[in-house]
Amino acid sequence: DAKQQGRNTWHWYKGDEQRATEEAVRLRHDLHYALQHEQFELYYQPIVDAVSGRTRGLEALVRWHHPERGMISPGVFIPLAEQTGQIIPLGRWVLMRACQDAAVMQAANMRMVPVAVNISSLQFRREGFIEDVLQVLDETKLPSEFLELEVTESVLLDGAEKAIALINQLKDIGIRVALDDFGTGFSSLSYLRDLPIHKIKLDRAFIQDIVSDRNNAAIVQGVITMAHHMGLVVVAEGIEAPEQQQDLVRRCCDLLQGFLFARPMPRDAILSLPDVLPSE
Ligand code: C2E
Ligand code: MG
Ligand code: MG
Ligand code: MG
């Protein structure tokens, strides 16, 4: 009967919830171990010129090779690492590894393109972040023009002034900052006026059905036009179909990123991309 069913449903719900909590507790614990045992790897995904398809940049995306569970998505473990504070050592590891890899690419005489590193807001706003960046550049001897940082609107959470000051400091060092997942946050447009960023990355949510949804297409067109008037570069994320590329080329989007061009791949696969190999 209904009462019985209701109770069963409740039991199932509780079971799932409990499992999810236990899983998170375990992963948070494993994360600590993983940091000390080098279970992380950086993959790189090309960011290409919208018209020519030529590689113009690489985005570093962290991967966790869990000994029992296989590959775990950053969409799962980055939020956990943010809860525990482990995002700080993990973020530092990512930054160091990305700059080391970029230095290797430079030594391999590749056509150099900037490497973009995702920075959690916690890491970004933490005391000493700029010093960490400077130290990594110094240790790896990577010229600052080859490092880009991707931050999200959440860097604005405790006031725009601090974020503006930090981005200006990075700019002075020669590091460009991109605003990631643009359009998915809750901030007003007015902050765009004051943030000294270089680039906007339009979230995949707007790109997915750009060809069929007129409202999404209108938003994308509006953002591109606005960004260009502000002197910003626009990247569209999550391009999977040629029709999406055609649409975005028509709308004058500058750069594209997505499975249509390349999936994220290990460093050594990047090193053998014909597009970035040294021209003899
Ligand atoms: P993001 O920075 O917006 O990165 C883009 C995500 O979209 C990546 O997922 C990428 O694999 C995926 N993607 C690229 N092209 C396509 C496409 O054509 N179709 C679809 N469906 N997906 C595409 P990934 O690697 O799973 O990373 C997810 C998120 O985790 C990232 O989103 C970023 O917010 C975070 N993340 C990844 N690596 C790091 C890191 O080193 N540090 C920090 N703080 N966050 C990271
Ligand atoms: Mg990103
Ligand atoms: Mg993004
Ligand atoms: Mg995204």
Image: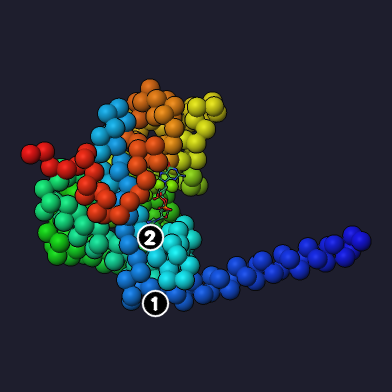
Distance between mark 1 and mark 2 Cα atoms = 15 Å
User: Relative to 76, does residue 178 appear above or below in the rendering?
Assistant: above
For the view shown, which residue lies furthest in the top direction? 250
Residue at 35% across / 33% down in the picture?
227
Mark 1: secondary structure: helix
82 with respect to 12 (left or right): left
Residue 159 visible in image? no
232 with respect to 244 (left or right): left
Dot 1: few (<14), some (14–19), or many (≥20) neighbours within 10 Å? few
Residue at 22% across / 47% down in the picture?
272
Q: Picture coordinates of residue 88 (x, y %)?
A: 35, 68
Give the residue number, with chain letter if any, for mark 2.
Answer: 63
Q: Picture coordinates of residue 231 (x, y %)?
A: 28, 33
Q: Nearer the viewer, residue 273 or 202?
A: 273
Give the residue number, with chain letter if any, for mark 1.
Answer: 33
Determine which of the numbered discs, if any, sits on residue 75 in the image: none
Looking at the picture, which amino acid does disc 2 mark?
Arg
Q: Are marks 1 and 2 in contact (CB under 8 Å)?
A: no
Mark 2: secondary structure: strand
**Is the CB–ligand 1 distance for label 2 below 8 Å?**
yes
Q: Quadrant of residue 243?
A: top left
Looking at the picture, which amino acid does disc 1 mark?
Tyr
Q: Picture coordinates of residue 52 (x, y %)?
A: 27, 29
